Image (spheres, grey):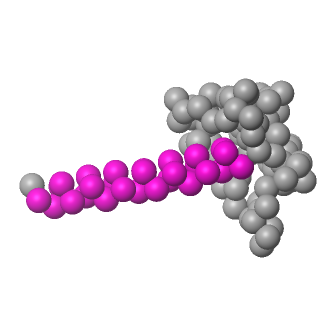
């Protein structure tokens, strides 16, 4: 479980689970989300919400993981642009840590 800050003053935060991060990865939710200016503002959050909404609408199989992500994180009262930026930073760090762990495990297997 991870905790992200959702406002600049640090008075609000949100819990992010491994499952939430895996769902973001599974559906590539942050792919092509941010414009070339790199700024995460309310329009980026709205774009993410619309992308997820259309994904759920077009899915034929169970989308419980996406719905959980929406309820717990994306549509949470504390989620604003600042919180989304923190979530993106957490996701990037999580991805890097995961890759490093996989590389380390491969190295271990090659030595044995």
Q: In the rendered view, does 68 fall on the left or right side of 42? A: left
Residue closest to the far bottom? 36
* Count of numbered badges drawn on the protein: 0
The quarter of the picture where residue 111 lies is bottom left
Give percent across and percent down for residue 90: 58, 46
What residue is drawn where x is 83% and y is 27%? 77
Q: Is residue 92 visible?
A: yes
The residue closer to the viewer here, 10 or 96, is 10
Give percent across and percent down for residue 29: 71, 52
Residue closest to the far front? 9
The quarter of the picture where residue 102 lies is bottom left
Q: Is residue 54 visible?
A: no
* Above or below for 107 versus 79: below
Give percent across and percent down for residue 60: 77, 42
Q: What is the span of residues highlighted in magenta in the rendered image? A: 85-111
Q: Please tell me whether residue 5 belongs to the stretch shown in magenta.
A: no
The residue closer to the viewer here, 24 or 96, is 96
What residue is drawn where x is 63% and y is 36%? 4
């Amino acid at each position: 479980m991870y905790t992200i800050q959702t406002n600049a003053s640090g008075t609000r935060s949100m819990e992010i689970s491994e499952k939430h991060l895996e769902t973001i990865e599974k559906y590539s939710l942050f792919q092509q989300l941010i414009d070339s200016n790199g700024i995460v503002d309310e329009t980026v959050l709205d774009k993410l919400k619309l992308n997820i909404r259309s994904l759920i609408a077009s899915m034929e199989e169970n989308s419980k993981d996406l719905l959980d992500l929406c309820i717990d994180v994306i549509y949470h009262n504390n989620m604003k642009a600042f919180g989304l930026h923190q979530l993106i930073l957490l996701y990037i760090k999580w991805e890097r840590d995961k890759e490093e762990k996989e590389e380390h495990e491969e190295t271990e297997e090659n030595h044995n």
